[in-house]
Image (cartoon, grey):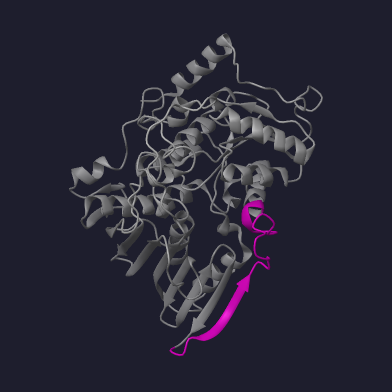
Amino acid sequence: MNNEPSRRDFIKKSVIAGSATFVAPTILSSSVFGANDRINAAVLGINGRGKSHIQSFMNQKNVQVTFLSDPDMNLLKERQKSFKEKYKKDVGIEQDFRRLLDRKDIDVIGIASPNHWHALQTIWACQAGKDVYVEKPGSHNIWEGRKMVEAAHKYDRIVQHGVQLRSSPAVREAIQLMRDGYIGHVYMARGIVYRWRASIGRQGFSPVPEGLDYDLWTGPAPKRPFSRDIVHYNWHWLWDYGNGDVGNQGIHETDLCMWGLDVGLPTKITSMGGKFLWDDAKEVPEVLTSIYNYPEEKKIIQFEVRHWCTNDEAGATVGNIFYGDKGYLVVNGYDKYQTFLGKDRTPGKSGDDGVASGSEMDRGDGGTDGHVANFIEAVRKHDKTILNGPVETAHLSSALAHLGNIAYRLERVLTFNPKSETFVNDPEANQMLSRNYRKGFEVPEKV
């Protein structure tokens, strides 16, 4: 069902009822609205990556963050204060982002909310005529990822996926080396995510904190009793809201695996893993190994998540390794690569973006700033062909993670049809392609 009317109904009702949470910034005066080619941005979700969105938008020439939105009013007030202190400018705050969608003085939307909100917020923003920079993963499930793609195309919107390594000059150089045959025929990619993830304990149920609109935070997902196990960060480790580390940090690496191998979605998937250390509230596996097979292309992706003490692989703890018949290539993190050639693993070509450790936000052409710069250029030119991380990457890289998670949860090898984006003769698996959405928060069947 197309829920565009329900979105507009909400806007109309909220205008009639008024908004107690709306705080207009003093910068939004008639003298600056529509000033030349300035782009006004609103950022949705400001607890984690949202802080990076704010900084990167503000680092762009003639771009202004004019609104912040988050279901937690306490966070909003903190960010509004810190914004004023850092930039010497005012910024508006709005607890319910839906009130921002039809504002004509907002051009682009940065989405850094929890995973379960990404697709619907992107679709609604596209319907409202906004261009979108959406954090990884683009979707919480495979079906809604496809709906994001359809919405971006139907409403002719610029949608950039937050896989910033696609804007790294070094990583782009590495991809071109593989295309040129530098390590020979590239037949396998390995993605690794070795992040230090401690126990989150079990905090149990508690009253909803004052200032948090928990119903809005829940949005499309099933509404559980409130717990600190969920809000603000640990939702990553609960299936209703997050997708584990393969669907968190891992999206950078699933995306690069597919980009480097030049493949789409696989036809055979298997996964195995589990929780081996912590008896805590996490539902997702601590350790997960997934295999994605492409029999027709004669290529394969291996993906591994580890959460505690471990070795690195070829110097990387988060990154990718590509194997060819002449050598292998290692992408370490977001902005550097090294090649090793022949039986003796002789060091070959290498590259990096020349960035000192700890300065992720200042990477010139790469990093979040560079990726946002690429987005803003595409917005100004209204040319989606120059996007480094177009909406299709949001769908496909997220879908690869979802496929691995489904195989893990069903504990069997799955056969997938990439053209129809459905499992073959497997009704149980096909049920996991989407979810039941709460009333008023449905991802529309027809965008």
Q: Total of numbered circles in the picture?
A: 0
Classify residue 131 by image quadrant: top right
In this view of the protein, which residue sits in the foreground, 285 or 355? 285
Point out residue 173 in the picture as x, y percentages from the top left corner.
59, 69
Point out residue 197 in the picture as x, y percentages from the top left corner.
44, 56
For residue 378, above or below residue 294:
above
Is 310 on the left-hand or right-hand side of 54?
left
Q: Which residues are magenta?
A: 343-369
Residue 39 can be seen in this image = no
Give the main secondary structure, helix, strand or loop, of the magenta stretch.
loop
For residue 170, above or below residue 11:
below
Is 9 on the left-hand or right-hand side of 289?
right
Residue 230 can be seen in this image = yes
For residue 317, above or below residue 387:
below
Furthest residue in direction bottom, as rendered: 344
Point out residue 342 in the picture as x, y percentages from the top left corner.
46, 87
Magenta-span inclusion, residue 348: yes
Is 96 on the left-hand or right-hand side of 352?
left
Quadrant showing the N terminus: top left
Residue drawn at point x = 68 percent, y = 65 percent: 355
Furthest residue in direction right, as rendered: 31
Quadrant showing the C terminus: top left
Classify residue 445 by image quadrant: top left
Is 198 on the left-hand or right-hand side of 299?
right
Point out residue 144 in the picture as x, y percentages from the top left corner.
39, 39
Residue drawn at point x = 36 percent, y = 65 percent: 301
